[in-house]
Amino acid sequence: MFKKILIANRGEIACRVIKTARKMGIATVAVYSDADKDALHVKMADEAIHIGPPPANESYIVMDKILDAVKQSGADAVHPGYGFLSENPLFPAALEKIGVAFIGPPVGAIEAMGDKITSKKLAIKAGVSTVPGHMELIEDANEAVKISNEIGYPVMIKASAGGGGKGMRIAWNDDEAREGFQSSKNEAAKSFGDDRIFIEKFVTQPRHIEIQVLGDKHGNIIYLGERECSIQRRNQKVIEEAPSSFLDEATRKAMGEQSVALAAAVDYCSAGTVEFIVDGDKNFYFLEMNTRLQVEHPVTELITGIDLVEQMIRIANGEKLKLKQEDVKLTGWAMESRLYAEDPYRNFLPSIGRLTRYRPAHEGTKPDGTIVRNDTGVFEGGEISMFYDPMIAKLCTWGKDRPAAIEAMRVALDRFEVEGIGHNLPFLSAVMDHERFASGSITTAFIEEEYPDGFSGATLDGEARIKLAAVAAAMNMIAQLRRTRISGALTNHKRRVGKNWVVSLDGENFALKLKARHEGARIKFSTGEKLNVVTDWRPGQQLCLAKIDGEEIAVKVAPCDSGYCLRWRGAEIIASVQSPMVAELAKLMPEKIIPDTSSLLLCPMPGLIVSIAVTEGEEVQEGQALATVEAMKMENILRAEKKGVVMTINCNPGDSLAVDDVILEFE
């Protein structure tokens, strides 16, 4: 077995590999850029080697720097993680020359499957069902438009060397095809150093379902069931689950067998994933094969009990698979929610900064038999950089069935505390509570269809709002009792806490009577509801754990001018608790007027101005491209919300801007 493994990656996947290597008694080596000198993967590894400046193209994807680190450390194997050099065939070839094992597939398989055009041709030859499209290279935007018309809109414009949603655009007309071609080409060049583009038919009502395969160097290949990855935004997966609620056993078997046939056609060994688009009639079409570990691999591990990283290491060491296809059993259900450093209230734009608070839900097996797992690469006090992918953690749950896994995820998301940056925890909670998601009736268009105007927070029903009002009243009682004890000790005058209160949740009032009890409070609403609230919350705590008539609830709490900001199940609500007299007077207070910024184009995220598409004095139309901002390896095109005339341009291509910096001003 290997003595020392270097992980040619960063963040949560580097930490993930280190955990398995440690379990196997193998020493580990981390590599890090200037931005990652204090990163969690650096702290976890047995040793760490510096490889350069923050940009990935000056550090993590510079092959010579990684090879130098391998030589310095004396590592006898390298695990590439995903992204960066994981699917670059030159990397394992270079490792082979210096006698170091690559924990991944052979060069030929990476070359064949890493190129989407070549892989599709091989898939057809291997008898795998494929999507119609143009697999030859496309020279320019005009040719892209011509090909798109021949295939028929909508089409998917994709980077040949792409992955992770980079370099992908959907086009529904000629203008979008022309614009999408150039953006895909730019993103592909920056992310992969390869700007080749191809176009294929976009399947409507699609579900994204992928098959996990595992093969050894002795010709044995098996599949480990499927993962449903249909909850996507901008072609980037957000929530995954295993198995899929859509597949029947016959379709699962057919997809698995075709995946194994494709893997066999390229002498595949190691872990790999064959991705398919599946339509409403369970027809499935090959998309691509990822010749590496997938981000969402934990859900497969949870339902099979197989450590995929361990299998990759053993396969690279020349061991035979001990599993046969008939040994693979899918048990229970697993969910994965990707925690991204992005602001769902600002159209999911990237967010950077310091994690002033980072408290994941506790991992392990719970009393009800469910399991919580959190794969992460960050820690409280750490920095989220603009140089890398915005995913900072993968929260996973397992239950005996799909409803149990979803409920476990709801609870785990409620207890997950993140402060200091914008993040998508509220959105993840909202999806888990969404009726359509719970029913399993999902497609890759779920987010676009259910949140067409973006995400502005979940809407809680009447029963949920009653619970939040009760929690707010109980917290206020605790705070009031604390004040009376302090003031009484100072003045020897005993104050009493009133029984009648009005809780306002974003302006909706709940009148109630409250009776303090040793372990909590008895609350009676004017509408007749009676609730017992038990909590040991204390003022200043940012998570209120309570039981309402025996039901556990976890509410995130932050102080605000008028009371508390409560966050629960994807909703963010301002709660104020007042005496009836103060509540009446509060109705007379004037409303705060929000400043008008409609004549400004504000930078929606910290990022780099790639281009300005207009000039001063130019009249622009609604929907017209104004500027392109790059952040976390993604290009974002900013468009005009209405017709107007550009008065002032305040920046130039190449400038770095902060959130809400003014890019353009309109007359």
Image (cartoon, rainbow, N blue to C red):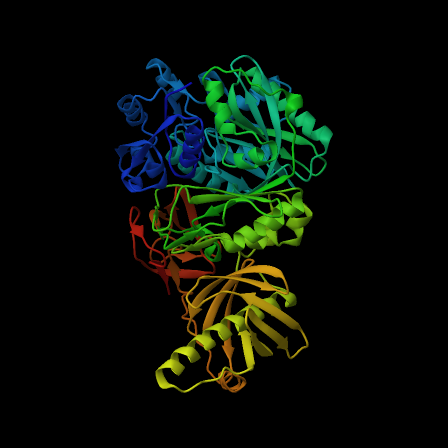
On screen, residue 328 versus residue 93, left or right, reads right
Q: Position of residue 279 (x, y in %)?
A: 67, 37
In front of the other: 618 or 628 = 628
At x 39%, y 39%, the residue is 11
Q: Nearest the camera: 1 or 578?
A: 1
Residue 138 lies left or right of residue 489; in this view the side is right
Q: Could you tell me which quadrant the N terminus lies in? A: top left
Is residue 24 visible in the rendered image? The answer is: yes
The image quarter in which residue 422 lies? bottom left
The image shows residue 170, relative to residue 65, as above or below, that is below
Which image quarter holds the C terminus?
A: bottom left
List x then y, in percent, for residue 439: 69, 48
Q: Residue at 60% across / 67% down in the picture?
A: 467
Residue 315 appears at what percent x and percent y?
49, 19
Q: How many marks?
A: 0
Is residue 259 shown above or below 486? Answer: above
Residue, x 41% and y 87% (percent of image)? 493
Q: Residue at x 41, y 69 (%)?
A: 596
Residue toward you, 316 or 500: 500
